[in-house]
Image (tube, rainbow, N blue to C red):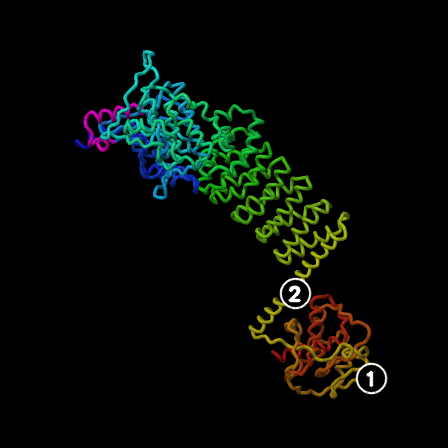
C-alpha cells in the first residue's frame, strides 16, 4: 500500500499525458532516408539518449499524437555518491537550465513544450523532438558511429544557426552562455542545431541595472562536468582577466568548430587546470594545416587571446568560409528570408534549386530542404516550380517515408486544375508516385489524379493523362481498368471535338486491347468505334490499328460482322492516299483469311463430331454412289435395263400405268441386295424411310377403270430409264390419291426383299417427300413416279 501511494505521488502530468519510451518511438517515429546522412533507424532511437545528466526519450501525446522529447533526471541514480552541497549545486544548475529554456523563445534555442516538474525522485520536462547532442554526432574514428553523420554543408549550416542563437542571447536576452560546448548543442529532428545547457548563463546586467559580478570558474572533479564550465572551451579573458564580455562565447564557438573538424578534440586540452589554460592562451591554433584555407582563417580569428579581434555573431556569416553556393541556397530558403522575397525571386530560386540539389547530402535534403518546400506549396502559383524539386528529393525516400512525409501534402493538389502545369508535373511523375505508394493507397489516393486530368478543360492535360494510361493498364487491377479507367477514356473519346485528343484516345484504346477481355472489346469498344463519322486520315488510320489488334483477339464471328464491315467502309474514305488504302486492304485480307481459315475448321470439326455420333449410335453410313455419271444416268441412248425386263418400242412418255398393269409378269423372287463396296462422303447422311402408312396398298393411277386385274410385280431397274424432255408435274393432292378406289388392285403377294437399286429407292423417297409437302393434282402424277413409289412401298414392307 505504501508502494502504491509512493507511485501515485511520483506521477507527473507529463507521464500521464504522454506515452514515453520505446513503445512511443515505434508507434509514431518519423522515418528518414537511408544513406550517408541518415539517422540511425529513426529520428529518435528506441533506446534512451543521454545528454549530460538528462535522460532523453521519445514521447507521443495520448490525445493529439504530438511528438516530443521528454527529459528526465533521476535524483537517486545520478546523485548517489554526491555530498549534500554537490547535490544542491546539481539541482540548482539543472533547474536553472530548464527555467531558461522555458523563458527564451528563438528558432536557434531548444524549444520547451512542457515546463519542468519535480517529484521526489526526478526532474522532468518536455521539448521539441531531438535526435542527439552534437557531441554524439562528431566522428571520432572507425570505432565510433555518430548518431548523425555530418557533412561540411550541414556543419556550416549549423554554425550559422548557432550564430543566430548567440546573437539573440547577446542582443535580446543580454546573456552570456559561458558554457558553449558540443555537449550543450542539440540536433533536432529537422537537423537544426539548437543551443541548450543554459544553466550556467551569466546576465550582463543585474536586476538593479548594474554590471554582473564575475564568478571564479572553479572546477571540481567530484561534481559532474556537465554542470561546470569546461576549461577546454572557456575563453581566456574570462578565466584569466575576469572579464564578462559576449565575445567569450565566440571563442567557445571557435573551439566547437575546431572540435567538429578534428574528431572531437578541442584546440587545447587543459584538463580542468587554470594553469594549463594560462599556458595555452597565447599559442597559435594547432593542427589545422590540412583544413580548408577559409576554415583555417576562420579559426584563427575566433581562437585568440584577445576578445577585441573576434567577429561577432552578426558579422561571422559574412566570412568567406560561408560563401559557398549550397550555404547561400540554405540561407535564401530560410523561413525568415524566403517570406520576404518577391514572387519573381521565388520563381527564379526554385528554377535554380533543381540544379543545386545534388550538392546537398541526402539527410540535408530530407530534413531541411524538403520541409521548407512543402511549406511553400500553399502558394498555388509557385507549384509548377516547387513540385520538380519535391519529386527530385522524393526519389531518395522509401515508400513509407514518402507516404508519411510527402503524400499528405500532395493529395490536395490532385484536384487543382489551374494552372495546368501542376497536373502536367504530377502526371509526369505518376510512375514515381506509383512506386512510392502501396497498391491500395495508390488506387484510392493517387489514381483520382488521372481521372481529374481526363476531365480537364485543357487539351494538353487530357493528352498527357491519356499518355499515362497504357502503363497503368499493366500495373493496376483489371477490375479498375475495365470498370473505371476504360469508361472514362471512352467518355473523353465521345465528348472531344479536337483531332489531337481523338487520335490520342484511339492510341490509348490500342494499348488497352491487350488488357481488355473479349466481352469488353466486342460489346463496348466495337460499338464505340462504329460511331466514328470523321473522314480524317489520322483518325481512320488510328482506328485501323485498333481494329487490327482487336481483330486477332476477338472471335471470328465478331470480326466478320463488326470489324470487317467498318474497315471496308473506312477504306473508301476520300482523303486516304494510296499507301493508306493499301494498309486497309492488307488488314482486311489478313482478317478475312483468319475468318475463312477458322470457320472452315469449325465446319469440319462439326461434321466430324456428327459422323462420330452417328457411328456411336449404331447407324452405318451408306454409300449411294452407283458409279454412274450424270450423262449416263439421264442419256437417251444409254438406257441399260435388266435382261428380264420387257419394254416395248414406246418411250416413257407413252408408257401408262394401265399398260404396265395389263402386261402379265410372272412373280420373281429377288435376292437381297448386296452390301455396297464404295462409301459415300462423310458429309452425306442416310435419309429416314418415309412413312407410307397412308398407302395401304400400291398406288394406282386415277385413270384406271374397268375390271380388276391381277396384281403384277413391279420390275426393279438397276439404272433409271431415259426420261422425256418435259418435266413431270407433281401438282397432285395426297388426299386424292388416298381417296382413290382400291378395288382395282388386290393386295400384293408376299415377296422376299427386292434387290432395288439404291438410286431407285432414293428417287422414290424424294417423290414421296415432295407429295407430302406440296399440293399435287392427281392428274399430274406421272406413271414413272407411280411405279417408283409402289416399288418403294414394297421395299419398305419387306424391310419391316
Q: Quadrant of residue 151?
A: top left
Earlier-in-chain disc, 2 versus 1? 2
Q: Is residue 772 visible?
A: yes
Is residue 628 found left or right of 104 in the rendered image? right
The x, y position of residue 479, in whole percent, is 52, 47
Q: Are marks 2 and 1 in contact (CB under 8 Å)?
A: no
Quarter of the figure that contains the C terminus = bottom right
Q: Residues within 10 Å of mark 1 (few under 14, many from 20)?
A: few
Q: Which mark is residue 600?
A: 2
Q: Residues within 10 Å of mark 2 (few under 14, many from 20)?
A: few
The x, y position of residue 381, in whole percent, is 57, 29
Q: Is residue 482 visible?
A: no
- Residue at the location (20% across, 32% down)? 80
The x, y position of residue 723, in whole percent, is 79, 77
Is residue 370 found left or right of 469 in the rendered image? left
Q: Is residue 617 above or below residue 506?
A: below
Q: How many marks?
A: 2
Return the residue nearer the eye: 167 or 652: 167
* Bounds of the magenta segment: 74-98
The stretch drawn in magenta includes residue 141: no
| Residue occupied by mark 1 | 649
Q: Quadrant of residue 251?
A: top left
Disc 2 and disc 1: Cα gap in Å?
Answer: 52 Å
Return the residue nearer the eye: 693 or 445: 445
Q: Main secondary structure of the magenta part?
A: helix
Nearer mark to the viewer, of 2 and 1: 2
User: In terms of secondary structure, where does tag 2 sit?
Assistant: helix
The x, y position of residue 310, in whole percent, is 41, 23
User: In terms of secondary structure, where does tag 1 sit?
Assistant: loop
Return the residue nearer the eye: 397 or 5: 397
The residue at the far left in this view is 2
Amino acid at each position: 500500500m505504501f508502494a502504491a501511494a509512493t507511485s501515485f505521488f511520483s506521477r507527473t502530468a507529463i507521464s500521464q499525458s504522454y506515452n514515453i519510451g520505446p513503445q512511443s518511438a515505434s508507434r509514431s517515429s518519423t522515418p528518414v532516408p537511408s544513406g550517408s546522412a541518415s539517422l540511425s533507424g529513426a529520428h529518435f532511437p528506441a533506446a534512451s539518449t543521454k545528454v549530460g545528466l538528462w535522460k532523453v526519450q521519445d514521447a507521443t501525446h495520448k490525445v493529439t499524437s504530438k511528438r516530443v522529447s521528454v527529459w528526465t533526471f533521476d535524483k537517486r541514480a545520478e546523485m548517489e555518491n554526491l555530498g549534500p552541497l554537490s547535490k544542491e549545486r546539481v539541482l540548482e544548475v539543472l533547474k536553472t537550465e530548464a527555467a531558461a529554456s522555458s523563458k527564451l523563445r528563438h528558432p536557434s534555442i531548444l524549444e520547451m513544450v512542457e515546463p519542468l516538474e519535480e517529484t521526489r525522485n526526478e526532474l522532468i520536462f518536455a521539448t521539441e523532438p531531438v535526435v542527439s547532442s552534437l557531441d554524439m554526432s562528431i566522428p571520432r574514428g572507425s570505432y565510433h558511429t555518430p548518431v548523425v553523420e555530418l557533412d561540411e554543408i550541414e556543419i556550416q549550416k549549423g554554425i550559422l544557426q548557432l550564430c543566430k542563437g548567440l546573437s539573440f542571447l547577446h542582443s535580446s536576452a543580454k546573456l552570456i552562455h559561458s558554457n558553449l560546448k558540443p555537449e550543450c548543442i542539440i540536433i533536432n529532428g529537422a537537423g537544426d542545431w539548437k543551443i541548450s545547457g543554459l544553466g550556467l548563463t551569466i546576465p550582463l546586467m543585474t536586476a538593479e541595472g548594474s554590471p554582473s559580478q564575475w564568478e571564479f570558474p572553479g572546477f571540481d572533479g567530484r561534481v559532474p562536468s556537465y554542470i561546470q564550465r569546461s576549461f577546454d572551451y572557456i575563453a581566456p579573458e574570462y578565466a584569466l582577466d575576469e572579464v564578462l564580455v559576449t565575445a567569450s562565447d565566440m571563442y567557445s564557438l571557435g573551439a566547437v568548430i575546431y572540435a567538429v573538424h578534428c574528431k572531437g578534440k578541442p584546440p587545447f586540452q587543459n584538463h580542468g587546470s587554470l594553469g594549463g589554460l594560462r599556458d595555452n592562451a597565447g599559442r597559435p591554433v594547432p593542427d589545422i594545416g590540412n583544413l580548408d584555407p577559409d576554415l583555417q582563417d576562420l579559426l584563427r580569428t575566433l581562437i585568440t587571446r584577445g576578445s577585441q579581434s573576434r567577429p561577432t555573431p552578426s558579422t561571422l556569416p559574412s566570412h568567406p568560409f560561408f560563401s559557398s553556393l549550397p550555404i547561400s541556397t540554405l540561407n535564401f530558403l530560410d523561413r525568415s528570408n524566403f517570406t520576404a522575397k518577391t514572387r519573381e525571386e521565388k520563381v527564379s530560386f526554385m528554377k535554380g534549386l533543381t540544379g543545386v540539389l545534388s550538392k546537398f547530402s541526402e539527410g540535408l535534403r530530407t530534413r531541411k530542404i524538403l520541409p521548407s518546400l512543402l511549406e511553400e506549396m500553399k502558394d498555388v502559383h509557385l507549384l509548377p516550380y516547387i513540385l520538380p524539386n519535391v519529386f527530385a528529393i522524393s526519389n531518395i525516400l522509401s515508400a513509407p517515408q514518402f507516404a508519411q512525409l510527402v503524400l499528405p501534402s500532395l493529395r490536395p493538389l490532385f484536384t487543382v486544375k489551374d494552372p495546368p502545369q501542376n497536373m502536367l508535373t504530377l502526371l509526369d511523375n505518376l510512375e514515381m508516385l506509383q512506386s512510392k505508394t502501396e497498391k491500395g493507397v495508390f488506387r484510392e489516393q493517387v489514381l483520382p489524379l488521372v481521372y481529374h486530368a481526363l476531365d480537364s478543360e485543357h487539351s494538353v492535360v487530357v493528352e498527357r493523362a491519356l499518355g499515362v494510361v497504357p502503363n497503368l493498364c499493366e500495373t493496376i487491377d483489371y477490375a479498375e481498368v475495365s470498370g473505371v479507367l476504360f469508361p472514362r477514356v471512352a467518355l473523353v473519346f465521345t465528348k472531344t471535338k479536337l483531332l489531337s485528343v481523338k487520335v490520342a484516345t484511339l492510341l490509348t484504346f490500342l494499348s488497352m486491347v491487350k488488357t481488355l477481355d473479349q466481352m469488353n472489346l466486342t460489346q463496348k469498344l466495337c460499338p464505340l468505334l462504329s460511331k466514328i463519322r470523321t473522314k480524317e486520315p489520322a483518325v481512320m488510320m488510328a482506328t485501323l490499328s485498333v481494329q487490327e489488334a482487336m481483330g486477332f483477339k476477338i472471335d471470328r464471328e465478331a470480326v466478320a460482322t463488326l470489324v470487317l464491315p467498318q474497315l471496308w467502309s473506312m477504306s473508301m474514305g476520300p482523303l486516304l492516299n494510296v499507301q493508306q488504302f493499301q494498309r486497309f486492304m492488307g488488314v482486311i485480307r489478313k482478317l478475312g483469311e483468319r475468318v475463312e481459315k477458322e470457320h472452315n475448321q469449325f465446319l469440319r470439326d462439326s461434321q466430324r463430331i456428327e459422323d462420330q455420333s452417328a457411328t456411336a449410335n449404331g447407324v452405318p453410313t451408306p454409300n449411294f454412289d452407283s458409279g454412274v455419271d450424270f450423262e449416263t444416268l439421264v442419256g437417251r441412248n444409254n438406257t441399260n435395263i435388266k435382261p428380264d425386263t420387257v419394254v416395248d418400242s414406246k418411250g416413257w412418255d407413252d408408257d401408262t400405268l394401265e399398260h404396265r398393269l395389263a402386261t402379265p409378269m410372272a412373280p420373281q423372287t429377288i435376292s437381297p441386295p448386296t452390301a455396297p463396296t464404295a462409301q459415300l462422303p462423310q458429309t452425306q447422311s442416310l435419309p429416314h424411310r418415309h412413312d407410307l402408312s397412308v398407302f395401304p396398298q400400291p398406288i394406282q393411277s386415277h385413270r384406271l377403270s374397268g375390271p380388276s386385274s391381277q396384281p403384277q410385280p413391279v420390275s426393279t431397274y438397276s439404272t433409271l430409264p431415259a426420261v422425256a424432255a418435259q418435266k413431270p408435274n407433281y401438282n397432285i393432292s395426297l388426299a386424292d390419291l388416298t381417296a382413290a378406289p382400291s378395288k382395282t388392285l388386290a393386295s400384293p403377294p408376299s415377296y422376299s426383299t427386292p434387290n432395288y437399286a439404291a438410286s431407285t429407292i432414293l428417287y422414290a423417297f424424294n417423290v414421296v417427300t415432295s407429295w407430302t409437302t406440296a399440293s399435287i393434282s392427281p392428274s399430274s402424277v406421272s406413271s414413272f413416279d407411280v411405279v417408283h413409289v409402289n416399288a418403294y412401298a414394297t421395299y419398305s414392307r419387306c424391310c419391316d
